[in-house]
Image: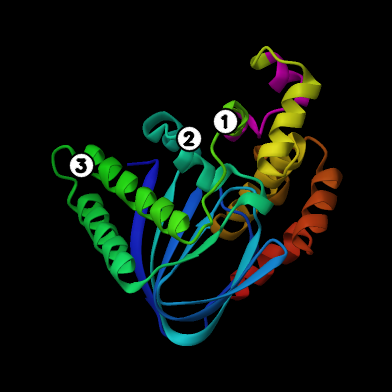
Amino acid sequence: MDNFWISYRQTTEKYYLQRHYEYRFQVLVMTGGATVYQIGEKSFSLQRGDVVLLNTLEDHTLKVKRYPYSRYIFQVSPSYMHGRIQSPDILSLFVCSPENRHPVVHLEERDFDRLCQICTEMLDESEQRGSHCERMIMADLNRFFVTILRVLERQNKAVPAADAGTVLSYKVLNYLDHHYAEDITVGQVADHFYLSRHYISHVFKKTTGSGIMEYVISRRINHAQTLLSESDMPVGKIAQECGYTDFTWFSRQFHSIVGQTPSHFRAAMHES
């Protein structure tokens, strides 16, 4: 499944994540160790029983405080979530603006054991690729997210009910994820949805906490980070692949967001 992957990882020493964005919705289930997760402006101390829900708008870093650090980690593409799950409540776990989102959820042992079992089942399905594999994984994903919703409700942290604005914002996110590398404008996005620029910008900002072009830039720079760390593609070509025709402008935006030039970022990644 190109739109979903899952793994179980255990790290015993020297693990650190630099500031970056995800290009998919990512879920991390802590099963051992202790870490400090920086998500946007907020810092979270995590240990066994904690679940992290990351969307494509939030930059984050991670430092491990106690080894061995073990976790399930899975990613789901936004387009897959939109096309297959289609539940406003579940979408709200990822789409809501920062003040309404709960990126870290702590579970009691019974609920946590249930989630770990679901992760194990998804991992087995993903590795074995048996008949109806995708349907089984979809069923497990729904069980996983409904469990999270129930826990949040019991903790009086239920996400706001997803309204028409949330659904529209999710459709816009899906559209941007397919077109962010193009010469895209807010006007083009508005025209695609037959809405005014002001209305679609207002709804998207209210729902996600991010402007449309702010999101486009974050997706471009995140893609650039991936290409710089995982390929030998020339930096100029990477800029073009990420939607930039002006290399100087690409370099400035990259430095503004990442804190390094593209070349320095690549060198640091290769050294690590």
**Is residue 216 a member of the stretch shown in magenta?**
no
* Magenta stretch: helix, strand or loop mostly: helix
Secondary structure beneath disc 1? loop
- The answer to whether residue 185 is left or right of residue 127 is right
Q: CA distance from mark 3 to mark 1?
A: 32 Å
Q: CA distance from mark 2 to mark 3?
A: 24 Å
Judged from this view, the residue extending furthest toward the top is 194
Q: Which contiguous range is marked in magenta?
A: 175-191
Q: Nearer the viewer, residue 137 or 234?
A: 137
Closer to the N terminus: mark 3 or mark 1?
A: 3
- The answer to whether residue 128 is left or right of residue 226 is left
Residue 223 x, y percent position in the rendering: 62, 47
Q: Quadrant of residue 164?
A: top right
Judged from this view, the residue extending furthest toward the left is 131
Secondary structure beneath disc 3? helix
**Residue 88 shows which numbered tag?**
2
**In this rendering, does residue 219 appear at all?**
yes
Q: Say which residue label 1 marks.
A: 163
Q: Quadrant of residue 142?
A: top left
Q: Residue at x 26, y 57 (%)?
A: 118
Residue 22 x, y percent position in the rendering: 57, 52
The kind of residue on which mark 3 rests is Cys
Disc 2, disc 3: CB below 8 Å? no
Q: Residue at x 63, y 50 (%)?
A: 100
The kind of residue on which mark 2 rests is Pro
Q: CA distance from mark 1 to mark 2?
A: 8 Å
Within-10-Å neighbours for mark 1: few <14, some 14–19, many 20+: few
Disc 1, disc 2: CB below 8 Å? yes
Q: Nearer the viewer, residue 171 or 220?
A: 171
Residue 175, compared with residue 142, is above or below; it is above
Q: Say which residue label 3 marks.
A: 133
